Amino acid sequence: MGYFNIICTAYLLIISICYSEEKKAGISYISPEQVKNIGENVVMNCTVDNIGELPVFWNKKHRGITTDQTVVSVNNNKLVNDPRYELVFVNGSQQTFSLKINNIQIHDSGIYECQIVANFTTKITQFVELQVRSPPTIIDQHSTLHLNVEEGQDVVLKCYAEGYPRPTITWTRDLNAILPAGGQSTEGQELRIKNCRKEDRGLYFCSASNNVGEPVQKSVNLEVEFAPIISVFRPKVAQVQGYSIDLECNVLAHPPSQIEWTKDGKILYNDNHYEISHLGIVNDLTLSKVRILSVENHNYGDYQCKATNKMGFAQSRINLYKPVIPIEYTNNKL
């Protein structure tokens, strides 16, 4: 390219001397926007007047990137090493420089400039935009794939897609659950959730479609951190001495919480009297259980189920009392 730049510079120095102010060069016709399918051919025409010895270029620019330019041809000389590109020159009362591209691919889309270069400061330019119909593709690097936030924060899930025509983005939730703002679906590149709640956590799907090929879909996992919430199915439990009993609490929390059981201010541990277990269920829910292997008189009273994570703390009370007659619990009798 360095050698080519030297040649072009010398050429411009020569032809700039010949440039006439009396008879202005110009572009009298340029092809309109071209919309093609992959595999088709396209011809872009540029008709010029009064160019004399001035050079006529075809340049290609990527849409939205003005600094990224490829010189395709100068006059009737092709400068790209791509056999799909052809040049056709028609010389008459006017001169037409045609650029033909065979077997169009997605990467051929862009801005094609027809440019007359009079000197270093004077350039006459018109352009043709080539749009190539292409199926949607979701751009991972510009889209949200996973997000972890604290409850109460505002959230933006992003989904950007390429393709022509421009794809439509549709958001839905797993199992067609209702979206935070209502409804089962909404359109747009961004899904905004204000004052995010724990109920908003889960899988979201962004689908891109443009009626070219099949729609594509990506999942976004939204995790919401929230303080523990404890629920107790039986806040009062009865059992006679000599029988076993299970005290249970359900802990909902994200991130997972540290769970402990206490009685009379003392932490309970696994030993020959207590069996403590924590079982993960689903959706950040943990079943915590302390089994008293053989109830004795000193076991009656209040037990505390406590859960702590970085978002906060919760506790709930279960009272074990002595009934008049034994209470039947499955697998509780020793």
Image (cartoon, helix red, strand yellow):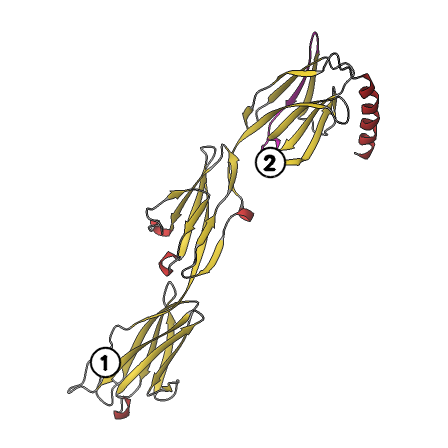
**Which residue appears at 51% of the width and 48% of the height?**
143
Q: For mark 2, what is the residue?
A: 64
Q: Secondary structure at mark 2?
A: loop
Percent across and percent down for residue 220 are 45, 52
In front here: 185 or 83?
185
Q: In 3D space, how far apart are the residues under numbered discs 1 and 2 (Cα atoms)?
A: 70 Å
**Mark 2 neighbour class, 10 Å CA radius: few under 14, some 14 to 19, many 20 or more:** few
Residue 76 horizontal/vertical position (percent) = 74, 19
* Residue 91 vs residue 217, the one in the foreground: 91
> Which kind of residue does numbered mark 2 sit on?
Gly
Q: Is residue 332 visible?
A: no
Disc number for residue 237: 1
How far from the left and from the top, in percent, is residue 182? 33, 48
> Would residue 185 be counted in the magenta stretch?
no
Q: Earlier in the sequence, mark 1 or mark 2?
A: 2
Asked if residue 68 is positioned above or below residue 303 in the image, the reply reads above
Name the quarter where the N terminus is drawn: top right
Does residue 177 lie above or below 279 as drawn? above
What range of the chain is rendered magenta?
A: 91-109
Instruction: Look at the image and tell me in which quarter the C terminus lies.
Output: bottom left
Q: Residue 5's image quarter?
A: top right
Disc 1 and disc 2 in contact, CB within 8 angstroms: no
Please identify, in this view, whether the residue under mark 1 or under mark 2 is nearer the observer: 2
Q: The residue tagged with tag 1: helix, strand or loop?
A: strand
- The residue positioned 56% from the left and 23% from the top of the image is 33
